[in-house]
Amino acid sequence: MEFPCSNLRVLWSFILFDAILLSSIYPCSPSVFTLKNETDRLALLAFKDGISEDPLRILSSWNDSLHFCKWEGVTCSLRHHQRVTSLNLKDHSLVGHVSPHIGNLSFLRTVNLSSNNFQGEIPQEIGRLFRLQILNLTDNSLQGEIPSNLTHCSEIIAIQIERNQLDGKLPAELGSLSKLISLNVRSNNLSGSIPPSLGNLSSLTTLRLTSNNFDGQIPNQLGQLAGIITFLIGANQLSGTIPPSIYNLSSIQVFSVAANRLHGSIPPNLGLLFPHLQ
């Protein structure tokens, strides 16, 4: 179908008018695109506000003279422009609290705040980081309970929160983290029984529950951890016997159930059952 020139002129007039109208409402200036990622910058500044002592002046670069992707300890995505994917501030003598605003860094894959002096609780908002793969809060002074909503971090492969002052129970919900490879909560004040649901962690290779106050019996379900390599549950208050299912874990290299209240005997053919034992 052909249109008369007059009709085409009218049509182009409408298109031009719409373009001018849209440009006035949504101007294509740099500030518009910057606003799309302002969430990450503000979340980092809120995290900085939670730091009360920074003796090494690690966070001195966290200011407006540098783009936040260039701040110390911050890594941004190459694929998703100006989105923070890693926060690595390990071993910097930082003192303070982990800000709940960390949950606004929705592209985070790695959080490493180990070997500092963070206090207070692990914020529940970390459970909003559905892309998170590694959570390392080792060697701090964190208190309170382990957030059960860490199960929302379905991509997580490592939870390392050893040597803190955490208490309460180990959340049974963690048994739903199908990609979890390492669970390390040793040297805390955790209590209650070891959740049988941990037997559902089909990808788990490292389980470190040493030096807590776990009681009750060793769950028979832990015998389902077919790929486990490191199995450490010593220095607790566990009772009963070692379940026969545990001896089916032929991949074990490091095994400790010492300093508990266990009884019974060790199978004489342990070397055959654990051929990789070191």
Image (cartoon, rainbow, N blue to C red):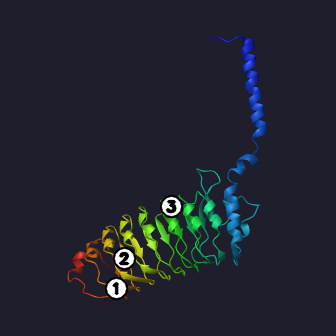
Q: Name the residue under label 2.
A: 231
What amino acid type should be assigned to the residue bearing mark 3? His
Work out whether 95 lies above or below 225. below
- The answer, for residue 163, to whether it is visible in the render is yes
Work out whether 13 lies above or below 60. above
Work out whether 165 lies above or below 86. below
Q: How far apart are marks 3 and 1 (CA)?
A: 32 Å
**Residue at the location (60% across, 65% down)?**
87
Q: Which of 79 and 52 is in front in this view?
A: 52
The crowd level at tag 2 (other Cα within 10 Å; few <14, some 14-19, many 20+) is many
Q: Which of 146 and 85 is in front in this view?
A: 146
Does 96 sit left or right of 215 as displayed?
right
Question: Which of the two labelled residues, at mark 3 and mark 1, occupies the earlier sequence position?
Answer: 3
What amino acid type should be assigned to the residue bearing mark 2? Phe
Helix, strand, or loop for circle 1? strand
**Residue at the location (70% across, 55% down)?**
38
Tell us which disc is closer to us: 1 or 2. 1
**Residue at the location (76% across, 48% down)?**
31
- The answer, for residue 73, to whether it is visible in the render is no
User: Is the residue under label 2 in contact with that under label 3 (CB below 8 Å)?
Assistant: no
Q: Name the residue under label 1.
A: 239
Q: Mark 3 points at which residue?
A: 152
Quarter of the figure with residue 181: bottom left
Question: Which of the two labelled residues, at mark 3 and mark 2, occupies the earlier sequence position?
Answer: 3
Q: In which quarter of the image is the N terminus?
A: top right
The crowd level at tag 1 (other Cα within 10 Å; few <14, some 14-19, many 20+) is some
Does 107 sit left or right of 219 as displayed?
right
Image coordinates for residue 30, horizontal then vertical, percent: 75, 46
Q: How far apart are marks 1 and 2 (CA)?
A: 17 Å
Image coordinates for residue 267, horizontal then vertical, percent: 22, 82
